[in-house]
Amino acid sequence: MLLIDFNLLVQEAPRKNHGAGSLYKVHKSIWLFHIYSFLRKVCFELRQAEEKFQDLMEKSVEERLANFLKLLLGKTKTKTFDLPLSREEIASLIGARQETVIRVFSSWKDQGYLKVHAKSLTLLDSSFLVH
């Protein structure tokens, strides 16, 4: 955050006998560092939002759901994993309707890609995640 303890800055400078000019330089460099850090964070979040928007506009629900499952799996090697979210929450995250998420899971189940349990999934064939 951009919160700075100004009392600490004001107390530090006189103790070191730097004078007003160096106190200004300390403030300026600290502010520049915090502004730079803030702008980097804003740019990073803007880039993420743009990527999510592009995903919503360009990718199908199946692709978005597959990407969600890839993120959820991470680098784990397990075939069965718990779904920490409801179908409605998953749909909200990927920009789809709950019914569509359920339909895609059912389609993947019928194609033999996975087994759907109440709150978990078992991957039988992960080739559908490679979109």
Image (spheres, rainbow, N blue to C red):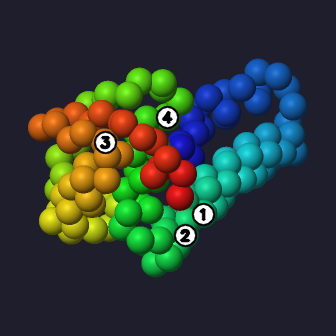
Percent x, y for residue 105?
Answer: 25, 53
> Pointer 3: what residue?
114
Tell me, yes or no, whether the two marked residues, 2 and 3, touch with CB atoms within 8 Å.
Answer: no
Relative placement, left or right, of 4 versus 32 is left
Query: Could you tell which of marks 4 and 3 lies nearer the N-terminus?
Result: 4
Callout 4 crowding tier (Cα within 10 Å): few <14, some 14–19, many ≥20: few
The percent coordinates of residue 64 (x first, y second) are 42, 61
Q: Which numbered disc flags the more N-terminal residue, 1 or 4?
A: 1
Reading the chain from its start, which is encountered first: label 4 or label 2?
Answer: 2
Q: Are marks 1 and 4 in contact (CB under 8 Å)?
A: no
Kindly identify which residue carries mark 2: 50
Label 2 residue SS: helix
According to the picture, the residue beneath numbered tag 1 turns out to be 47
27 vs 113, left or right, is right
Q: Of the residues shown, which amino acid type is indicated by label 4? A: Gly
Mark 4 vs mark 3: in front: 3
Q: Quadrant of residue 13?
A: top right
Question: Is residue 67 shown above or below 20?
Answer: below
Q: Using the numbered discs, state the Cα–Cα distance from disc 2 to disc 3 in whole angstroms.
A: 31 Å
